[in-house]
């Protein structure tokens, strides 16, 4: 993994654009691509305290060929987060841990034992 760029969103959240393509194999040449690594402050605490309310946690927004979310889309969303034209919540459909990340962020989703 290579970090292409680091930045801070207007709300103070640290983000970075990562390139994971070097981890692809000949068997799976398109498995990995660009990822936005974000470090927002959690609004809720997980049951095992891996994520604690009031502290930063890692949230990943990754390229996904099968969901038609291209490297170009990831780059554009990274730029939108940097400029403030999008918030993390706007990209929730691409969160790596889906509703779990949404719940940690304080979004209105059911706690399924996180």
Image (spheres, helix red, strand yellow):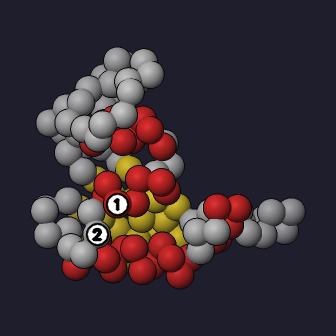
How many numbered circles does the render carry?
Answer: 2
Q: Nearer the viewer, residue 25 or 17?
A: 17
- SS of the residue under disc 2: loop
Number of residues whose C-alpha sits closer than 10 Å to that of mark 1, classed few (under 14), some (14–19) or many (20 or more): few
Q: Is residue 73 above or below residue 1?
A: below
Number of residues whose C-alpha sits closer than 10 Å to that of mark 2, classed few (under 14), some (14–19) or many (20 or more): some
Determine the CA span between mark 1 and mark 2. 6 Å
Residue at 70 percent across and 62 percent down: it is: 66
Hey, which quadrant is residue 52 in on the image? Answer: top left
Residue at 42 percent across and 80 percent down: it is: 76
Horizontal and vertical percent position of residue 12: 13, 62
Residue at 35 percent across and 48 percent down: it is: 58
Q: Which residue is mark 2?
A: 86
**Left or right for 63, reference 91:** right
Residue at 86 percent across and 63 percent down: it is: 27
Q: Is residue 6 visible?
A: no
Hey, which quadrant is residue 13 in on the image? Answer: bottom left
Residue 103 - label: none
Horizontal and vertical percent position of residue 91: 40, 60
- SS of the residue under disc 1: helix
Horizontal and vertical percent position of residue 37: 39, 60
Horizontal and vertical percent position of residue 31: 71, 62
**Left or right for 113, reference 86:** right
Q: Nearer the viewer, residue 99 or 30?
A: 99
Quadrant of the rendering where the C terminus is positioned: top left
Q: Nearer the viewer, residue 86 or 39?
A: 86
Q: Which residue is mark 1?
A: 90
Q: Nearer the viewer, residue 22 or 61?
A: 61
CB atoms of marks 1 and 2 within 8 Å: yes
Q: Is residue 56 above or below residue 78?
A: above
């Amino acid at each position: 993994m290579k970090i292409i760029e680091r930045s801070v969103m207007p709300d103070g959240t640290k983000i970075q654009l990562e390139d994971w393509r070097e981890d692809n194999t000949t068997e799976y040449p398109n498995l990995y691509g660009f990822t936005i690594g974000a470090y927002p402050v959690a609004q809720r605490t997980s049951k095992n305290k891996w994520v604690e309310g009031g502290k930063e946690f890692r949230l990943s927004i990754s390229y996904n060929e099968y969901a038609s979310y291209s490297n170009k889309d990831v780059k554009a969303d990274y730029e939108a987060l940097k400029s403030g034209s999008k918030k993390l919540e706007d990209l929730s459909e691409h969160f790596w841990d889906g509703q779990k990340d949404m719940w940690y962020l304080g979004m209105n989703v059911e706690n399924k034992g996180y």
